[in-house]
Image (cartoon, coloured by chain):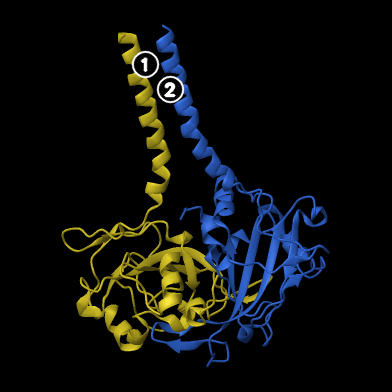
Amino acid sequence: MQKYLLGIVAGVGVLAACSFLFNTGPVVAQTQQYPVYDSAGGVKTPTGYRAWVFVGAPLTPEGLNDGKYNCDQPGGCTRSNFPEYHHVYIEKKNVDAYLKTGSFPEGTVIVKELTRVLKPTFPDSSRTEPSGRGYFNGEFNGIDMSVKDSKRFAATNGWGFFTFGHHALPYNPTAAESPVTDCAGCHIANVANTDMTWIQFYPQLRDKQAY
Amino acid sequence: MRNVLSVMILAVAVVAASSFPRNARSVAAAPQQSSAVFDSVGNLKLPTGFRSWVQVGTPLTPNGLNNGEAGFPEFHNVYIEKKNVDVYLKTGSFPEGTVIVKELTRVLTPTFPDGSRMEPSGRGYFNGEYNGIDETVKDSKRFADTNGWGFFTFGHHPLPYEKTSAEEPVADCAGCHIGVAKTDMTWVQFYPLLRDKKGY
């Protein structure tokens, strides 16, 4: 009887171990929990976003800009505010909702990951490759992120703005909400009518093309 | 003793049953299943759903920097299914059946001769209207003559795109890609996700 019980215990143990393995995949893949705010209202660097839906890639090369930005960053001052490619990613469920309703659901996260341009050889930062003269993605160069939460960010039209640095990897592990003058101000001034988002630069959202 | 044995058998059965769903899932994700669909005369059908695939990079060759007529006007948004990106990140080459879609967009209303314009984020280039699709398919048997990849185009023009494409002549596409034969015929050097291997 004791051996019998031991067998049952072993069997249950194996079952528990198996279902643990089985559940790991889907649980890890869930993103609904993001973002989680710390006590100071900061959030962690997003993960997995390079597999989200890509909606557009504005490009503001150093060679075409003449400002003085990002002087507090490890790379030093830059001529472009957002150097240089801006790859913009949104989870599919939220793109789906936008395509249906024209606005993003509560909890939507928009990640803009910057990349530098690849080794410029012309003053405008372009270079020549077999496909022609132009611009090609260089190294990853930072993340800005916006989060829709109408209650938490009521003061800035329902969206919170965060930055994890405009510099090469590794990015800052957490971000506090950016001051209104750094991000929200410009979004309020220019794109308040399109859910605080630069839809005019994102063909899929702008032209309402499906996938 | 017999009881103990039957409990052990039960335990083994539980292990087998539990691992079955895991295997079934990886079979469903098997890279052998290609999203490339060929019609009865061997032409490739226009891809669908690719705008939700993984974007690996976005070269830009503006008309304004290419004597008014870039070979690929102008943004090149490049998409690959996640299961195939996963394999590339592990092995350094793409599985059979991999499809790579390059969708072009024009730049948004240029105001400078180089094709750029001013926006609140700075002077530069912004995605304009969709402007065509080129596609490559990896099939080492079917495309043995061109290093295992076939090249197709559904036009370089606004929507709607062509519905099917015959394989392109070597001189139009494959000939140039032979230059990147060492990186599985793909311009990995322009795709940070594949080049720098940082994961998602």
Q: Of residues B11 and B68, which is closer to you in this image?
A: B11
The residue positioned farthest toward the left in the image shown: A39
The residue that label 2 is drawn on is: B11
What residue lies at 53% left-to-right and 76% top-to-bottom? A125
Going by the numbered disc 1, the residue's amino acid type is: Gly
Question: In this image, A49 relative to A164: left or right?
Answer: right
Tell which chain the image draws in yellow.
Answer: A
- Label 2 amino acid? Ala
Q: Which quadrant does the C terminus of chain A fall into? A: bottom right
SS for callout 2: helix
Find chain B in the image and tell me its colour.
blue
CA–CA distance between discs 1 and 2?
A: 8 Å
User: Residue A15 location in percent, x, y?
Assistant: 39, 29
Which residue is label 1 attached to?
Answer: A7
Q: Residue at x 25, y 72 (%)?
A: A178
Asked if A88 appears above or below B160 in the picture, the reply is above
**Other residues around mark 1 within 10 Å, as few (<14) / some (14–19) / many (≥20):** many
Q: Quadrant of residue B147?
A: bottom right
**Is residue B133 shown left or right of residue A25?**
right
